[in-house]
Amino acid sequence: MADRDNADLLVETRVMGQVTSPELSGGVYAVDSSGLPFVPIGSGGIKYNVKVGMSAFGWAGDQVEPGVSLAHPQAAANAALSTFACVGNTVQVRTGMAAGALGTVTGKHEEFVTYQHVLVDFDEETLAKLCPGDQAVVRAHGTGLALADASDVTLHSLDPGLWRKLTRPARGQALVEIPVVAVVPPHLVGIGSGRLSAATSICLQLGCRDDLGQLGLDDLRLGDLVAVTDWDGRYNTGYRPGAMLIGCVSTGTSRLAGYGPSLTILASGRGGQLGATIDPEANIARLLAVGTWRQP
Amino acid sequence: MVTANVEALVRVAVEGQVSHPGLRGNFTVGFDDRPQMRPGMAGVTVNLRIGDRALGWQCDHGEPGVSAEGPSPNRHLALQVLAALGNRVRMTSGLAQGAIGTVTGKHAFVLIDFPADVLAEICPGDRLVVEAWGQGLQLLDHPRVTVRNLGPELLGALKFESDDGCGLTVPVVASLPARVMGAGIGMSSEWANCDVMLHDAALVDELGLANLRLGDLVVMEEQDHRYGRCFRSGWTSVGVVAHALGPTPGHGVGVVTILTGPAADLGTRADPGANVGDLLGLR
């Protein structure tokens, strides 16, 4: 049982982001995997009606980011925001009509050479007041989180408080176990190979499949925890026989070739120390009491 | 012999220049978990050419020969999308002015082969013109097979077999399972290539890829590369090995797609000698 973490040694810092507004840098029409054009909507800005805890499928949109998408307009500062912000961290609005309101980081989302967003859940009252351009500060805490007795397991983008709610006593050969709704094979990883694990997401390429039920993924929700076998997310994301990666679903699906729901990388094991147990309720929104689990 | 709409294709001059290597000052972390800082991307790689081995170099995505770029982001994109494998290239400045080369691959740059004595004279910043020819290419008897990044020059050299049942058979050196397809999935079929994650020695042995060469024709199983690259059961894609191994997980040996279609329409047969450098007489 690897329950000794180094949370009391972690540096807590502050990183700034702005509420984004949607951009269409790739033109008006995107082209899906079968060659059909469509208008992509859902990344960037404020999504009033899409919350972590809702379905990852079915939206008439593309890679829909639940809640509020934050970014910093300066590239180096955005890299710091994207790296140091952790799922479960508290966010405070600093400017605009919602100044002072608190929210919670629920994921990170990277799009190839286009943007990196940090996704934040706020209550309805705050969403109604927020506006693109409003400043928010992330109380960044979690970078460097490590386990004393499981050196092959690397944790990324995890608030220490969320980590302690997430992990379960290990039962099998693994030293660390995390509940997940599904375990998927490596050939389902889409765009995201080679990215920097501490700051990113990878796509599960599920957008053009009609066998989600057979994969056990038709009920996949935003925030669900999912494991990928033979995939390594310790440094750069990539195929490694025997490794395992666990992440939380941070965006909705996509019709683009090689795309689908994004997973924000949370835990990776090189060779057997990290295990996953199936639990249909394994969802970070439930653990954090945000999104559809937010109490009025 | 396959029939194609070559007469309908527009042949256009696209300007480019020989790129220069760039570093961002940070190490990447290799498959061995160690920091890496190696040459291979951009510029002129003098001792790595099409036909050479793809594995075993101390390089990062080793690009053979000349790596060409466009002079601005939009022109670079045009160069990437319009250039096709087999296209003719003319040097238009520098000591090698007037020399003729051949497009053999794509990565973030367009990769061009020149004879060794010419390559020795080429320098970053030298200008060139790619006689881009191939966008819109269709195989008229094989409508379910989609062509990508294939110039008529290479089309004419490929040793296809075409049967009456509209099946097309392409000779390939090796077969790549879907689980090793890395960076490049999800990106446009005309942009760069798809990295094949061949870092694990046991995996390379299992797949019989130890002697893989730059320019080799390979089949990518369960891949649909029509409108971006993705996994699709029952589909297959054929490509050309464009660059040597990158050491970072998720990256690897780059394969440029030239054909994609349902496996029933696009078949392959093993041919250990199926190499674009040989087919085009470059080595």
Image (cartoon, rainbow, N blue to C red):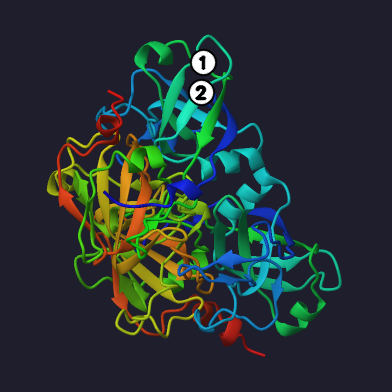
Q: Quadrant of the C terminus of chain A?
A: bottom right
Q: Quadrant of the N terminus of chain A?
A: bottom left
Residue A71 marker: none
| Residue at the (62%, 60%) spot, across then down | A117
**Relative height, residue A93 to residue B108 (above, below):** below
**Relative height, residue A78 to residue A18 (above, below):** above
**Relative height, residue B230 to residue B211 (above, below):** below
Q: Amino acid at mark 2?
A: Arg
Q: Which residue, given by chain and number where applicable, does mark 1 sit on?
A: B98
Q: Do dots 1 and 2 share one subunit?
A: yes
| Residue at the (59%, 58%) spot, across then down | A85
> Which quarter of the figure has residue B114?
top left
Whether residue A84 appears in this view of the structure is yes
> A153 or B281, which lies in front?
B281
Residue A188 in the image: x percent, y percent? Answer: 35, 66
> A188 or B121, which lies in front?
B121
Q: Amino acid at mark 1?
A: Gly
Residue B90 marker: 2
